[in-house]
Image (spheres, rainbow, N blue to C red):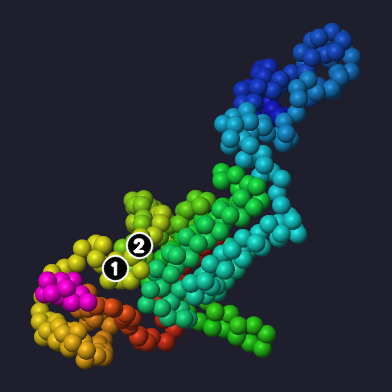
Amino acid sequence: MICPQCHSENLPDSTFCDQCGARLETACSNCGEPNRRDARFCKNCGRLIDRTPTTAPSAVPGAPSPDTYVPKHLAEKILASRHALEGEEAQKLIDPVLHVMMDAVHRYEGTVNQVLGDGIMALFGAPLAHEDHAVRACYAALAMQEEMRRYREKLGQSEELGLQIGIGLNSGEVVVRSIDNDLNIDYSALGHTTHLAARMQELANGGAILMMASTLREVEGFVEVKSLGALQVKGVSRPVDAYELVGVTSARTRLHAAVSRGLTPFVGRKTEIETFQKLIEKSVVGRGQIFSMVGEPGMGKSRLVYEFIYSPSRMAKQLPISRSSNCSAVTSKSRKGKGRKASERR
């Protein structure tokens, strides 16, 4: 016997459904004799059976109401989601969210290369190269979540039931291509890096920012993260380490980040330190000096300046120093069509 309420199969002699509790027999309004659910006439008195429902219908025909089998706060969320937004009403709600995300990307000089309905895909490090592309992506992600909190407050929404976005970050090489015609230019990134960024976004709960270990290696010391352990993601045979981005540190340069983690022992460079010392001593007696230091990226220019400023000999003599430096690396792409950063966010 099939229950008309939840469509579950029951034993032929069942009086009530063993899944939803609905009555399976119809009582005759004349003599009270129970009859089969689909019977038209009473088997005892022969009168036409009244078809008036004896139980209140569910909110959704064919299924019990969510508030009968889930906690109250979840039931409210399920019932609220039934009133789906369509057309212009949905556009009015989603468009400001897309602008929040795109503004954060542009603030840190990223590129929005795709708008995916209710989300976007953004690139940092391609086509515009940045040495700190991964750090910029993290700052942009945090800015998105902060702006979303303000947007929910503006709409009067709660943190639990209001609009939320999940963000996924990953770093690595991608193949980028530009397809253009007279009416449109399409800039896209392909590769395993973007695939894993999308998987991180899918795993991110509302309000969360997840990143891969490859991104953490690029931003370690600049941001605060919480380890989520090894997670199984679609399209990857082995679990991957994932981390949740929770905040930033006070570090603003790679050297500051390295100092916070602890520097390795400084060896050599005595000649350079002595040159610094002589220049400072000449400037103290009124002979102004200008010094320029040029070197390949990663040679240790910033570390050398840091070691001199905090060297025991300078600290002992208390030589005054007013420092203004901008040590940066100028790099070029080694292979056409290659970038360094891919991140996807919804």
Asked if residue 197 can be seen in this view, the reply is no
Magenta region: which residues? 307-320
- The one of 34 and 81 positioned closer to us in this rendering: 81
In the picture as drawn, the residue positioned furthest to the right comes out as 47
Looking at the image, residue 113 sits to the left or right of residue 237; the answer is right
Task: Look at mark 1 in the image and give the residue it sits on.
Answer: 256
User: In the figure, 36 relative to 320: above or below?
Assistant: above
Q: Residue at x 30, y 71 (%)?
A: 254
Amino acid on which disc 1 is placed = His
Q: Main secondary structure of the magenta part?
A: helix
Q: Residue 250: give its label.
A: 2
Q: Picture coordinates of residue 7 (x, y %)? A: 68, 32
Q: Residues within 10 Å of mark 1 (few under 14, many from 20)?
A: some
Q: Picture coordinates of residue 252 (x, y %)? A: 35, 68
| Circles 1 and 2: CB atoms closer than 8 Å | yes
Amino acid on which disc 2 is placed = Ser
Magenta span includes 318 = yes
Q: Quadrant of the C terminus?
A: bottom right
Q: Residues within 10 Å of mark 2 (few under 14, many from 20)?
A: few
Looking at the image, residue 188 sits to the left or right of residue 285; the answer is right
Nearer the N terminus, badge 1 or badge 2? 2
User: In the figure, 76 relative to 147: above or below?
Assistant: above
Q: Residue at x 59, y 63 (%)?
A: 100
